[in-house]
Image (spheres, helix red, strand yellow):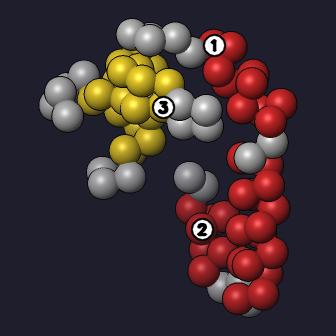
Amino acid sequence: MDSRLLDALRNAPSLDLYELSLALNQMLADPRRILDVRRHLHLGAQVMYFDHRRGTLAPGRVLQLQATSATVQDTATHT
């Protein structure tokens, strides 16, 4: 993520962060966005996913597809 954006967010008022959080959650929950992503996914698909523990993108394989999420196995660690 852009370090300038992170700096701006660190200095943003709490109300602005809350409003941004609401807007992002609405965008992520948009059924059209979800359908578009699901059209490109299938079981066994090789993907890049954001590993929140490492804070980076990592290669993975889709193991399960749920209505609004997917289970991905890290291909490097098999976890």
Mark 2 burial class by Cα count in 10 Å: few <14, some 14-19, many 20+: few
Q: Residue at x 41, y 37 (%)?
A: 57
| Residue occupied by mark 2 | 6
Identify which residue, 49 or 10, lies in the foreground: 49
Q: Residue at x 81, y 75 (%)?
A: 19
Residue 30 falls in image quadrant: top right
Three-letter amino acid code at disc 2?
Answer: Leu
Farthest residue in the left direction?
77
| Residue 59 in view in this figure | no
- Relative to residue 15, is residue 78 drawn left or right? left
Residue 32 falls in image quadrant: top right
| Residue occupied by mark 1 | 40
Question: Residue 70: which disc?
Answer: 3
Three-letter amino acid code at disc 3?
Answer: Ala
Q: Secondary structure at mark 1?
A: helix
Identify which residue, 38 or 23, lies in the foreground: 38
| Residue 63 in view in this figure | yes
Which of discs 3 and 1 lies nearer the camera? The answer is 3
- Relative to residue 29, is residue 51 drawn left or right? left
Three-letter amino acid code at disc 1?
Answer: His
Mark earlier in primary sequence (1, 2): 2
Q: Residue at x 61, y 37 (%)?
A: 68
- Relative to residue 53, is residue 18 drawn left or right? right
Which of discs 3 and 2 lies nearer the camera? The answer is 3
**Residue 47 placement (x, y as % from top left):** 45, 20
Q: Secondary structure at mark 3?
A: strand
**Residue 65 placement (x, y as % from top left):** 50, 25
Q: Secondary structure at mark 2?
A: helix
Mark earlier in primary sequence (3, 2): 2
- Relative to residue 1, is residue 54 drawn left or right? left
